[in-house]
């Protein structure tokens, strides 16, 4: 039975070396593979073939991602090896080529083989783990790839609804667009959800055109991506204090999630960034890190509430959980804290404008924390550029979408400003 072992060569003085693999099958077959996965020799555990457990410089998520990449590569090698008809005649060079085909199928696929929409999309998704974000140069996130798969799923459901198995590229016209949008609206999708799937489809087809796989006239105007500014909530400083003072000590998981939310609300971090902040990123009264989404460096001063929570956990942030589970728990915590002001939201659902009323706790999510930070600091009169520097927003247009100040609050802010100006005069 074939086995695979990961190892590194320590003769080099480089800070990082490539992880190598050796596949063995009995005494006669020894095949090698040099991967692009790299590691610092000082943190490599040669016995367990992972990062050493006691190394503190690795965040648990990064450690797990690295260890999973080693396990995944071993599985690929075994799958490739097991389907080879003439294992005895297999050389390392041929084995490397077969592994490359498994890892990068797009390099071995001709445009003629991707002559329909679903064939192309399947290949597009297969390539996705090897893609780089054009702005940051980093690999696409798990959420990016899941969005591609969701759009593919809805396109296939749409095809089934009109009794088609696939679409030719010349099927992509104004009629296709209109019918697909109507199909999504019939599923009671919001306007922004519909727009998100159109945006992904447009991304895929634009790349197909660049690669010469298809030529769809007027694609830019056919696939119109619409967005809608919707009512979203934030918690004001009194509500944040109300949430903070709520005793959740008998419900530990809600207690931790509440603390995590308060960190978001007083730092302006995204959920995906805060879970990666390590103890070493916190010093001299500031949190410093690079944002995952934009690669922006941000320096955040420690608000008294943040400092109190960090001390509670000995400067080790609460254990990370999934965003979905977090959103479920923070609603329960906010409900217990009686964050129950009535909010009215208006949005387009299924192509129709819908107005609904909710208690505030029902709409709270992880992103409410970041939105609360931006809005509360704006209401405090802090300079917009100063807030943007901490939140990491690159443009004022993007930042202003986070400001959820009602007209009445704007009027009150102006009245206070006038009182201050004219009392001095």
Image: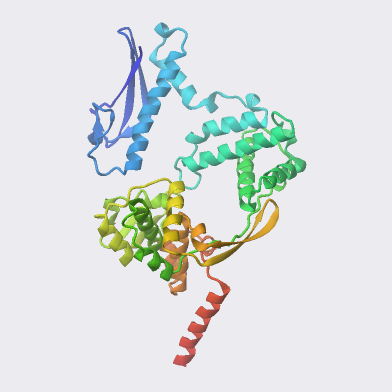
| Horizontal arrangement in the rendering, residue 167 relative to residue 101 (left or right) | right
Q: Position of residue 197 (x, y in %)?
A: 62, 44
Give me the residue at 69% from left, 30% from top. 166
Coloring scheme used: rainbow
| Horizontal arrangement in the rendering, residue 411 relative to residue 6 (left or right) | right
Give me the residue at 61% from left, 36% from top. 152
Residue 17 occupies which quadrant of the picture?
A: top left
Q: Position of residue 304 (x, y in %)?
A: 31, 67
As drawn, 48 above or below 248? above
Please tell me how many numbered marks the rendered image carries.
0
From where the camera sits, is residue 383 visible?
yes
Give me the residue at 33% from left, 56% from top. 288
Give me the residue at 41% from left, 61% from top. 265
Q: Considering the image in quadrants, where does the N terminus appear?
A: top left
Of residues 324 and 293, the one drawn nearer to the viewer in this rendering:
324
Residue 208 occupies which quadrant of the picture?
A: top right
As drawn, 280 above or below 91? below
Q: Position of residue 37 (x, y in %)?
A: 36, 32
Of residues 11 and 423, the one drawn nearer to the viewer in this rendering:
423
Of residues 166 and 331, the one drawn nearer to the viewer in this rendering:
331
Of residues 372 and 78, the one drawn nearer to the viewer in this rendering:
372
As drawn, 232 above or below 170? below
From where the camera sits, is residue 213 visible?
no
Q: Position of residue 176 (x, y in %)?
A: 74, 40
As drawn, the residue found furthest toward the front would be: 250
């Amino acid at each position: 039975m074939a086995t695979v072992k990961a190892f590194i060569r320590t003769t080099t003085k480089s800070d990082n070396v490539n992880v190598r693999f050796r596949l063995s099958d009995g005494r006669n077959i020894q095949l090698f593979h040099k991967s692009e996965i790299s590691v610092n020799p000082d943190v490599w555990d040669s016995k367990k073939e992972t990062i050493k457990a006691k190394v503190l410089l690795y965040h648990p998520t990064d450690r797990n991602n690295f260890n999973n990449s080693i396990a995944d590569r071993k599985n690929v090698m075994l799958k490739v090896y097991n389907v080879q008809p003439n294992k005895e005649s297999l050389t390392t060079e041929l084995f490397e080529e077969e592994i490359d085909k498994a890892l990068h199928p797009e390099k071995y696929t001709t445009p003629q083989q991707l002559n329909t929409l679903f064939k192309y999309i399947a290949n597009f998704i297969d390539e996705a783990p090897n893609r780089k974000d054009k702005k940051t140069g980093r690999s696409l996130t798990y959420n990016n790839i899941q969005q591609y798969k969701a759009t593919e799923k809805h396109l296939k459901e749409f095809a089934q609804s009109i009794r088609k198995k696939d679409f030719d590229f010349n099927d992509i016209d104004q009629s296709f667009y209109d019918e697909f949008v109507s199909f999504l609206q019939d599923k009671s999708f919001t306007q922004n959800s519909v727009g998100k799937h159109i945006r992904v489809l447009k991304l895929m087809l634009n790349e197909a055109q660049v690669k010469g796989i298809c030529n769809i006239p007027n694609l830019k105007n056919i696939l119109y991506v619409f967005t809608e500014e919707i009512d979203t909530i934030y918690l004001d400083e009194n509500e944040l204090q109300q949430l903070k003072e709520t005793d959740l000590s008998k419900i530990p998981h809600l207690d931790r999630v509440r603390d995590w939310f308060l960190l978001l609300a007083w730092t302006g971090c995204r959920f995906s960034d805060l879970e990666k902040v390590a103890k070493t990123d916190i010093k001299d009264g500031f949190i410093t890190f690079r944002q995952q989404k934009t690669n922006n460096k941000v320096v955040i001063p420690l608000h008294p509430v943040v400092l109190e929570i960090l001390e509670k956990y000995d400067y080790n942030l609460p254990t990370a959980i999934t965003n979905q589970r977090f959103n479920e728990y923070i609603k329960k915590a906010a409900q217990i804290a009686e964050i129950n002001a009535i909010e009215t939201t208006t949005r387009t659902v299924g192509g129709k404008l819908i107005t609904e009323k909710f208690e505030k706790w029902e709409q709270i999510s992880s992103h409410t924390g970041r939105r609360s930070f931006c809005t509360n600091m704006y209401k405090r009169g802090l300079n917009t550029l100063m807030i943007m520097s901490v939140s990491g927003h690159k443009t004022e247009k993007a930042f202003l979408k986070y400001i959820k100040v009602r007209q009445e609050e704007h009027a009150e802010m102006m009245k206070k400003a006038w009182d201050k100006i004219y009392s001095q005069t």
